[in-house]
Amino acid sequence: MNGSVTSTYEVLIDVALQKSGQVNGHCERCGAIDEEVHHIIRLNQENILDASVSINSENLVMLCKDCRNKEHQRFDKDTRFDEEGNFVPR
């Protein structure tokens, strides 16, 4: 890997397509049609260029939109942010 976010993203697309094929195009949580790739170890500025985190298929799960939204607690009334706008986990 050359340390480029663009090339990491392009490789991630390929890895996600392979992962989707491995799970027959289904969400690994509920069995619905998969739509999005989710990183088990969440990406951040420190690890996005670390291939063992960003494009490692063992760190990826395929999820439907509903399961990914639940995973990231989107649309949850109890979602909290600090004064700088950063997500505050429960």
Image: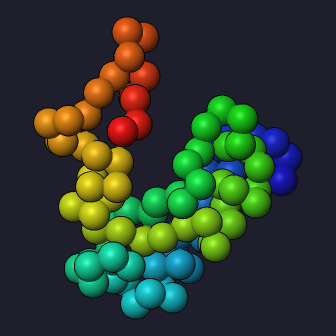
Image coordinates of residue 12 in percent, x first then y, are 60, 60
Q: Quadrant of residue 32?
A: bottom left
- Of all residues, the one furthest to the front in this rendering is 90
Residue 29 lies, with reference to residue 24, above or below; the image says above
- Of all residues, the one furthest to the right in this rendering is 2
> Which scheme is used to colour this image of the protein?
rainbow
Image coordinates of residue 72 in percent, x first then y, are 35, 48
* Residue 1 appears in view: yes
Name the residue rendered at 18%, 42% in the picture: 76
Taking depth in this image into account, of 42 and 49 the one nearest to the observer is: 42
Name the residue rendered at 17%, 41% in the picture: 75
Image coordinates of residue 63 in percent, x first then y, are 36, 68
Image coordinates of residue 6 in percent, x first then y, are 65, 43
Residue 34 lies, with reference to residue 44, above or below; the image says below
Name the residue rendered at 51%, 74% in the picture: 17
* Residue 10 appears in view: no
Q: Quadrant of residue 18?
A: bottom right
Residue 17 lies, with reference to residue 40, above or below; the image says below
Asked if residue 75 lies left or right of residue 19, the reply is left
Q: Quadrant of the C terminus?
A: top left
- Of all residues, the one furthest to the top in this rendering is 83
Total labels: the figure holds: 0
Taking depth in this image into account, of 26 and 67 the one nearest to the observer is: 67
Name the residue rendered at 38%, 79% in the picture: 28
Asked if residue 1 lies left or right of residue 17, the reply is right
